[in-house]
């Protein structure tokens, strides 16, 4: 069996699974490419092997701080009385995100408590109280860290974030002038789509091959259904409706399968 390792070999694999080489698959090249793109998008949104959990870092620039001080305005008009209107302002404190990022889980907090120098309270606890791990208990140390984290959460709080993959913007609702400085890094935990050109093994995924073949088969049936009942040479009659119906059943079963067996928990991807 030829293992698909590129988009082109993947395309011909799916066509062969439908009978290409023995019968004609009445689907255009553009339609095949559209169905492959559709399958890759669905695979990335619902299959845990279509995404990766990564930590991305970004260095704050002066332009971003200056932009965060501005507002985006939009107007609203009363539906009853057109003469009454209002202007709403929306902050521009956001950072553009890569196209492949589909969900942001968290932004690591801007705080000095996670520093690594000798004046860090965690360093002092280890130095003075845990000089010998073999003869002392770490339970008190763990409880102290939890207490410090709770105090930081109450007194400092976490920075609210907003993200939508179609906007490709990560909003950080904070005081940009005082909370961050130029050259400082922020780190986000996020989920990112796998790039098939970088990780070509995705084309050999069993589910993706079946799902893409079913989508192409549905397109094939839809094309043939326009000529339903037409008799060809040799007495063969086109029956696109049956092909279309079979493809719909296969797609329904595959989509049920991915949501039951391969989908990540929803709470794990909420940002």
Image: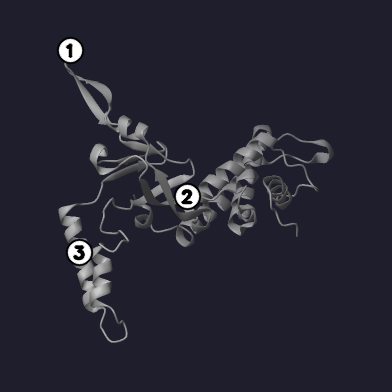
Are dots 1 and 3 in contact, CB under 8 Å?
no
- Residue closest to the eye, 235 or 155: 155
Position in image of residue 166 (x %, y %): 42, 37
* View extreme (right): residue: 234
Specify which label sits upstream in the sequence, 1 or 3: 1
On the picture, is 13 further left or further right than 235? left
Position in image of residue 192 (x %, y %): 47, 49
Position in image of residue 207 (x %, y %): 58, 57
Where 67 falls versus 198 (above or below)?
Answer: above
Report if residue 135 is visible in the image.
yes
User: Where is mark 2, residue-wise?
Assistant: 192
On the picture, is 167 further left or further right than 68? right
Query: From the viewer's perspective, is the residue at label 2 or at label 3 nearer?
Result: 3
Q: CA distance from mark 2 to mark 1?
A: 47 Å
Q: CA distance from mark 1 to mark 3?
A: 55 Å
Specify which label sits upstream in the sequence, 2 or 1: 1
- Residue closest to the eye, 85 or 152: 152
- For mark 2, give the secondary structure: strand
- For mark 1, give the secondary structure: loop
Are dots 2 and 3 in contact, CB under 8 Å?
no
Which residue is rendered at x = 71% and y = 47% of the image? 15
Picture disc at residue 83: 1
- For mark 3, give the secondary structure: helix
User: Where is mark 3, residue-wise?
Assistant: 148
On the picture, is 260 further left or further right than 142? right
Are dots 2 and 1 in contact, CB under 8 Å?
no
Picture disc at residue 175: none
Report if residue 228 is visible in the image.
no
Query: From the viewer's perspective, is the residue at label 2 or at label 1 nearer?
Result: 2
């Amino acid at each position: 069996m030829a293992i698909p390792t590129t988009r082109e070999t993947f395309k011909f694999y799916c066509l062969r699974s439908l009978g290409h080489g023995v019968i004609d698959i009445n689907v255009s090249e553009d339609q095949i490419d559209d169905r492959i793109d559709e399958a890759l998008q669905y695979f990335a949104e619902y299959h845990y092997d279509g995404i990766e959990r990564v930590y991305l870092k970004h260095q704050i620039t002066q332009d971003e701080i200056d932009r965060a001080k501005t507002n985006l305005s939009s107007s609203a008009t009363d539906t009853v009385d057109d003469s009454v209107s209002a202007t709403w302002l929306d902050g521009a404190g956001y950072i553009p995100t890569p196209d492949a990022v589909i969900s942001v889980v968290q932004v690591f907090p801007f705080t000095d408590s996670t520093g690594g120098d000798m004046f860090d309270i965690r360093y002092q606890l280890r130095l003075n109280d845990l000089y010998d791990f073999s003869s002392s208990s770490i339970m008190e140390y763990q409880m102290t860290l939890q207490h410090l984290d709770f105090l930081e959460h109450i007194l400092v709080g976490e920075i609210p974030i907003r993200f939508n993959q179609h906007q490709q913007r990560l909003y950080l609702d904070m005081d940009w002038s005082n909370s961050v400085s130029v050259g400082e890094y922020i780190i986000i935990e996020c989920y990112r789509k796998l790039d098939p050109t970088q990780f070509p093994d995705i084309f050999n995924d069993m589910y993706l091959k079946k799902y893409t073949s079913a989508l192409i088969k549905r397109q094939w049936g839809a094309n043939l259904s326009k000529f339903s009942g037409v008799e060809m040479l040799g007495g063969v009659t086109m029956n696109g409706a049956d092909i279309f119906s079979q493809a719909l059943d296969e797609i329904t079963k595959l989509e049920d399968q991915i949501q039951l067996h391969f989908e990540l928990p929803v709470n794990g991807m909420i940002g």
